Image (cartoon, rainbow, N blue to C red):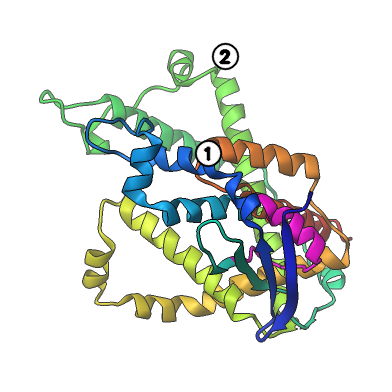
């Protein structure tokens, strides 16, 4: 039995749409045990290990409303796929949830708000793809020079890793190190290589695959850039903002991996977060426009991701990222797999 009601749908400015929904209290309360368990995992109190705080003490510590909010999130996530199917609102990226009414033991009300396909005058993408696909490609086979340079780099890295000073510090001067001779004894130390010839053939194949990957990526970018030039669209602000958030998250991850703090790095650059946002906005607009074009082509050509492959990829990601929600993970996987199929379709236009 359905536990929610769609109160209404409407179009918003800037190519957005809104679905207003109510979920009855009973459908929220069935998630109480799961909500308690989720809070218990993160709650630590003196004398109790995380996950073992008694429910009565947990309620006293965090309050009924906090628990009800967690229950509401679970109820929304549970009902979300069915709501989207019934509402028939085709969001072009993952919408966000805005809770408008919540009180313990009462129905919850919320809005689902997201971008829908704006008016778009799409370029003749098939014609553009055909033209770009006719362009002559550079040979992908590894040259003797590339093979020699790669083997030389492997020899240097091997020597650098294995050659140390008497004090135990790594030797940094390549010229003062004895590089290993390329013989069967050495190549067998590197991996499953039967002979020197086998080693060289596998290096050649690796170089070839890398060149093919780069050529494929270059061709794809060439096609999409040409389509981009001749496509007219007013970008929804929410899509640009979404791209900016992704760029900022990646920026923070990169800084953290370098062992730095964002605040210190920005101070060194003499920039503010607002400066970065201003600099990134043109690129964010371009990224959003590219995704919009790919989504539109998928709709026009009825290109969809394989449901079985989507499920398999979602299951794998959920095993790795325990805090990820199924609906958002599915939306991400469907987008990435659909994008790949659109590019494959474009590449096959001859």
The magenta stretch spans residue 83? yes
Q: State left or right for residue 249 relative to residue 25.
A: left
Instruction: Say whether residue 75 is visible.
Output: yes
Q: State left or right for residue 188 relative to residue 203.
A: left
Tell me the residue that label 1 is attached to: 33
Task: Tell me whether circle 1 and circle 2 mark residues in contact (CB < 8 Å).
Answer: no
Q: State left or right for residue 277 relative to residue 201.
A: left
Give the mark, 1 or 2, whose residue is nearer the N terminus. Answer: 1
Q: Residue furthest left?
A: 167
Q: Residue at point 79% right, 44% down?
A: 307
Q: Residue at point 67% right, 74% down?
A: 115
The x, y position of residue 153, in whole percent, is: 41, 37
Q: Residue at point 61% right, 28% down?
A: 201
The x, y position of residue 296, in whole percent, is: 79, 70
Seen from the viewer's position, the closer of residues 111 and 57 is: 57
Task: Give the crowd class for mark 1: few <14, some 14-19, many >=20 residues within 10 Å.
Answer: few
Q: Say which element carries label 1.
A: helix
The x, y position of residue 337, in whole percent, is: 72, 51
Depth check, mark 1 against mark 2: the one in front is 1
Q: Residue at point 28% right, 31% down?
A: 48
Seen from the viewer's position, the closer of residues 45 and 142 is: 45
Q: Which residues are magenta?
A: 77-96
Spatial CA span between label 1 and label 2:
59 Å
Tell me the residue that label 2 is attached to: 194
Task: Give the crowd class for mark 2: few <14, some 14-19, many >=20 residues within 10 Å.
Answer: few
Q: Say which element carries label 2.
A: loop
The magenta stretch spans residue 174? no
Q: State left or right for residue 58 relative to residue 346.
A: left
């Amino acid at each position: 039995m359905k536990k929610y009601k769609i109160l209404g749908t409407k179009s918003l400015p800037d190519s957005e749409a809104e679905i207003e929904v109510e979920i009855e209290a009973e459908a929220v309360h069935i998630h109480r045990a799961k909500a308690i368990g989720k809070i218990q995992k993160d709650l630590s109190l003196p004398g109790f290990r995380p996950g073992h705080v008694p429910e009565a003490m947990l309620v006293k510590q965090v309050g009924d409303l906090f628990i009800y909010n967690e229950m509401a999130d679970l109820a929304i996530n549970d009902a979300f796929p069915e709501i989207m199917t019934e509402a028939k609102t085709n969001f072009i990226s993952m919408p966000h949830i805005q809770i408008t009414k919540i009180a313990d033991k009462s129905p919850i009300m919320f809005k689902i708000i997201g971008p829908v396909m704006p008016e778009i005058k799409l370029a003749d993408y098939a014609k553009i793809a055909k033209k770009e696909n006719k362009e002559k490609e550079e040979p992908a086979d590894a040259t003797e020079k590339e093979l020699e340079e790669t083997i030389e780099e492997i020899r240097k890295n091997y020597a650098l890793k294995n050659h140390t000073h008497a004090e135990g510090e790594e030797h940094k001067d390549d010229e003062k190190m004895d590089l290993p001779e390329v013989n069967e004894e050495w190549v067998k130390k590197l991996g499953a290589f039967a002979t020197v010839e086998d080693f060289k053939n596998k290096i050649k194949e690796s170089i070839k695959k890398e060149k093919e990957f780069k050529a494929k990526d270059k061709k794809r970018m060439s096609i999409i850039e040409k389509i981009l030039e001749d496509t007219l669209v007013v970008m929804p602000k929410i899509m640009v903002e979404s791209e900016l958030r992704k760029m900022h998250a990646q920026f923070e991850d990169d800084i953290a991996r370098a062992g730095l703090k964002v605040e210190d790095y920005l101070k060194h650059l003499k920039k503010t977060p607002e400066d970065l946002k201003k600099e990134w906005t043109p690129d964010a607009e371009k990224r959003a426009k590219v995704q919009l074009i790919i989504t539109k082509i998928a709709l026009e050509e009825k290109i969809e991701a394989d449901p079985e492959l989507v499920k398999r990829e979602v299951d794998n990601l959920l095993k790795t990222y325990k805090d990820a929600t199924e609906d958002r993970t599915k939306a991400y996987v469907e987008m990435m797999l659909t994008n790949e199929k659109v590019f494959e379709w474009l590449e096959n236009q001859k």
